[in-house]
Image: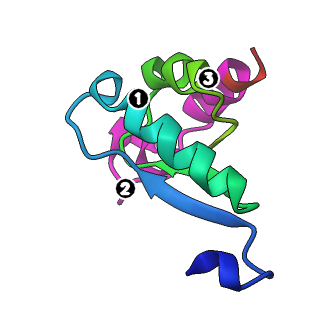
Amino acid sequence: TLARYPQIKRVLSNYQAKRIDQELPRLQQMMNYALSLGLQTTFAGGIQLETLPLLAQIGATDVHISSAARIEGKAANLLDPQRIRQFRQACDQ
């Protein structure tokens, strides 16, 4: 459905398992299918510093960190500049 709208270039998705390593094959399949339609996948939902290398293994290049970038990891809290720097450094590696 999304591929029918050329203005849509990116899809936001999350994983459903309690541990991302349990779902890597499905995530890679989903990401590859989206790429075949010209869509970039941005992963979200439980992204942590520890999950970045796992996503990199399947070729993921975009993440949305949401509450992981906030004080105490809570969505209602303010952004934590140190956490943002840590994520930026990890993504740059």
Give the residue pinned by disc 1. 24
At 67% from the left and 75% from the top, the residue drawn is 3
Measure how far apart labels 1 and 2 are at the Cα level. 25 Å
The answer to whether 30 appears left or right of 7 in the picture is: left
At 20% from the left and 34% from the top, the residue drawn is 18
Secondary element at image label 1: helix
* Callout in the foreground (3, 1): 1
Mark 2 Cα-neighbour bin, 10 Å: few <14, some 14–19, many ≥20 = few
Amino acid under disc 2: Ala
Q: x, y (%) of residue 45?
A: 38, 48
Give the residue pinned by disc 3. 56
At 70% from the left and 62% from the top, the residue drawn is 37
Q: Is residue 2 above or below residue 73?
A: below
At 71% from the left and 85% from the top, the residue drawn is 5
Amino acid under disc 1: Leu
* Residue 19 falls in image quadrant: top left
Which quadrant would the C terminus be assigned to in this image? top right
Q: x, y (%) of residue 55?
A: 54, 27
Q: Is residue 83 magenta?
A: yes
Secondary element at image label 3: helix
Q: Which residues make up the magenta segment? A: 63-90
Mark 1 Cα-neighbour bin, 10 Å: few <14, some 14–19, many ≥20 = some
Q: Is residue 37 visible?
A: yes
Amino acid under disc 3: Ala
Q: Which of the two labelled residues, at mark 2 and mark 3, occupies the earlier sequence position?
A: 3
* Callout in the foreground (1, 2): 1
Measure how far apart labels 3 and 1 are at the Cα level. 10 Å
Any mark on residue 75, and which? Answer: 2
